[in-house]
Amino acid sequence: MTFSSSKIYLSLLGLGLVVAVLAAILGWYRYQETNEALLAVREQADKLSQEVRDLGLKLEQSLAEGSQVAARLEAEEKKNEQFEDQIVGITNVVGDLEKLSQTDPELLKKYSKVYFLSENYMPAQLADIPADYLYDASRQLKANGEIIDFLTDLLEGATEDDIDLKVVSAYRSFGEQSSLKAQYSVNYGSGANAFSADQGYSEHQLGTTVDFTSTSAPAVFAGFDQTEVYKWLTDNAHKYGFVLSYPDNNQYYQFEPWHWRFVGRKLARDLHRDDKYFYNLDQREIDQYLIDLFD
Ligand SMILES: [Zn+2]
């Protein structure tokens, strides 16, 4: 190696070193710069995630408050519903009391040799029984105005089933009944009590009881229980609220297959279903049906 070539070599080495140092400085500088930017981004990210956490907390609080409000609202609504139920309950009781106060309790009383209807009793209203259904059209008969529709429905129902059902006796005042009984007594003596006696009398004075017959029956009353008309009544009268007061072999009175009393559809249906008779029931049991008498 010559002197000059070694000089050149040294110069080149020096230049190389300078370049390397410069590159290192630049690299470090760039690294610092990138690092700073990265840090800034991280800081931003931290800030954002903090905000997200704060929002999450706020949302949770809001939701909690919201569900509390909803719970309170629900409790209020429940209270209102209970209050409404109470009002409905009170209204029903008032309605029932009003209905009961307007229903004549005599209409569901059991009459006996010891318990009589007052001789001054009169139904609140009386109505004519349609002439088509009278056994003797020349004698207008009346029934309690509150049961006339039930009675007319029963008579129409029989007609629809081709049953010749006629009314031979209905409302009878105390006076009418007394003279009828006196007449029977003249004809039959003390035996009159057997077919015109006390219980049956009270029931006719109510206006809710009718004696049926049929133009096809052998006599007005005798043999009535052998007719298809009687059979129809035993199968259908309860649907219209009527029951047989004095069935065969009852312990109160003679068998009166023609004598039917209105006791309301509910009681009549229950008696029919249970194969019981009105006079078999306890008066307290019967009284529970008074409210439904005209339903
Ligand atoms: Zn009768």
Image: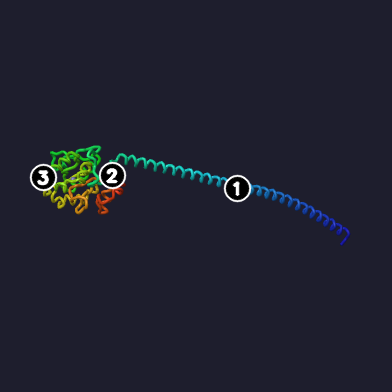
Q: What residue type is labelled 2?
A: Leu
* Quadrant that contains the C terminus: top left
Q: Quadrant of residue 124?
A: top left
* Residue 196 in picture, x, y percent from top left: 17, 46
The relative height of residue 227 versus residue 96 in the rendered view (above or below) is below
Which badge, 3 or 1, comes first in the chain's sequence?
Answer: 1
Q: Is mark 3 on a helix, strand or loop?
A: helix
Toward the viewer: 69 or 31? 69
Q: What residue type is labelled 3?
A: Asn
Name the residue tied to disc 1.
Answer: 57
Name the residue tied to disc 2.
Answer: 293
* Disc 1: CA contacts within 10 A as few (<14), some (14-19) or many (>=20): few
Toward the viewer: 106 or 166? 106
Q: What element carries label 1?
A: helix
* Residue 156 in sight: no
Badges 1 and 2: C-beta atoms under 8 Å apart?
no
Which badge, 2 or 3, comes first in the chain's sequence?
Answer: 3
**Tag of residue 187:** 3
Q: In this view, does 166 lie to the left or right of 5?
A: left
Closer to viewer: mark 1 or mark 2: 2
Name the residue located 28 percent from the left edge and 41 percent from the top edge: 104
* Disc 2: CA contacts within 10 A as few (<14), some (14-19) or many (>=20): many
* Disc 3: CA contacts within 10 A as few (<14), some (14-19) or many (>=20): few
* Residue 34 in picture, x, y percent from top left: 71, 51
